[in-house]
Amino acid sequence: MYDIIIIGAGVIGCAAARELSKYNAKILVIEKCEDVCAGTSKANSGIVHSGYDAHSGTRKARFNVEGNRMMDKVCEELDVPFQRIGSLTVCTDESQVSALFALKERGERNGVEGLRVLNRDELLKTEPHIGDGVVAALWAPTAGVICPFKLTIAFAENAAVNGVEFLFDAEVKSVFPENGIWHVKTAEQEYTAAAVVNAAGVYADVFHNMVSAHKINITPRRGDYILLDRAAGGYVRHTIFQMPTKLGKGVLVTPTVHGNTIVGPTAVDVEDREATATTAEGIDSVTQKSALSVKGLPVRQVITSFAGLRAHEDGGDFILGEPDDAPGFFDCAGIESPGLTSAPAVGAYIAGKIKEKLQLSEKEDFIPTRKDILDPKKLTIEERNELIKKEPAYGTIVCRCESVTEGEILDAIRRPVGARSLDGVKRRTRAGMGRCQAGFCSPKVMEILRRELGKDLTEITKCGGDSRIVIERTKDGEKDA
């Protein structure tokens, strides 16, 4: 029997887990994939939005601004890379300038600070590659960029250190109340709790509709992205948005915290909740539309493309808290953009509601901080040499593109809620995220995973499930030692 079960280990589920771990409670996070940050949270722009876009009075507006303000402290405590680089929302038609001022006024009502409309001459001073047709832009200095993997993983690791349990490869099949207790069934086992948090991303409506007569409907909205090599870094210095539409904020161009440039997304509503394959049409659309705001983008420097799904609910706003007819069941549904920005605030909000509901007491020994994986590249030569003397694995480069060492990979595997797959290692260390996209380092990473996890190479996967790399042995011989 648990006090709280959280369904979903994306950024919202892990943020809630971390906030709830501040209280004396037995908490379980159940995730259908093999790792945290393996669903909606793994494929987004990594933008911390300022908060001018959401309509005033909505939950999106409130939690966007609150989450933005919380981000500095959260990232300092959890050692997550975060940069406030500011954003520019550009318009390409003089008739749209009035809409920019309307966005500015909306943002000010939402509590966003520092908003200003810039003319073309002002824009060119800071962004010389701005599109030829751009006439003005809304400047939002509080916007920033963050690593969505690192943020989600940091929430999870800190929650685990503070006592939260994580269960992976466990797809929830049903949720129902019985005699005041919530039952959560997976294919293998049944778990019970006093409260349930529904943070299931594009599946959140499925679980909500199991327990409430007030039905909701989530449509998966696919977004295609392209990622440029770090050689193209610095082409733009700020996040550059296009004028928002009913489908989102348009195709953006932005630096990442790791020095790449990311471009996207498209916005295509789909039926399949697992449809994360890119399409030629989608990638073409990204490159064509981005040219409206940024000219001469070096698309020949693309090193990968990917797609993600956003959980768009028909009402267009976040759904948070208990349905009237399902006490103890706490929704975090319809969390699309600005969900990443809102995560710290949503986690705190849901934790506060559950604390009140279950009358939880605060821990005296809560650990608020967490250190990220040590990166030898950030050390001086003298410090790095001393590290290698103590830990020789930090002297072995595994991923040449990103200069990731064996020591970093070992740390990623051995940490709380550690990596169990190639993608798990990649999200934690960037091994495989460089120009060759894991073409050279995969075998070495697989060997380290095999050794550390005590598995055969045929059991090592790219991202869990059936994504094995080595299917079978082609000849007899001595098995791995």
Image (cartoon, rainbow, N blue to C red):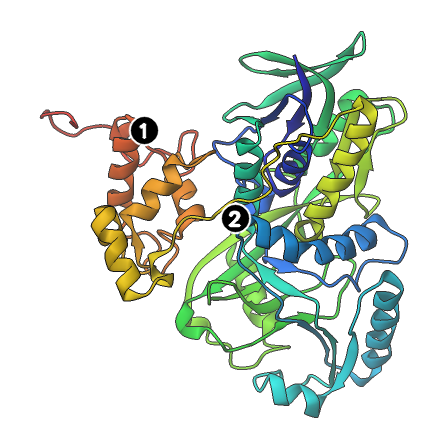
Residue 146 at what x, y percent from top left?
57, 58
Disc sitting over residue 149 in the figure: 2
Q: Amino acid at mark 2?
A: Phe
Residue 417 at what x, y percent from top left?
47, 33
Q: Is residue 465 above or below residue 48?
A: above
Give whichever of 404, 388 is nearer the camera.
388
Q: Which residue is mark 1?
A: 453
Q: Quadrant of residue 105?
A: bottom right
Quadrant that contains the N terminus: top right
Spot the residue most to the top. 179
Question: Mark 1, residues whose alpha carbon is within 10 Å: few (<14), some, or many (≥20)?
Answer: some
Q: Is residue 454 above or below residue 158?
A: above
Quadrant that contains the C terminus: top left
Spot the residue most to the left. 477
Q: Quadrant of residue 17?
A: top right
Q: Is residue 132 something one can see in this rendering? A: no
Which residue occupies 28% across, 59% down?
A: 384
SS state under label 1:
helix
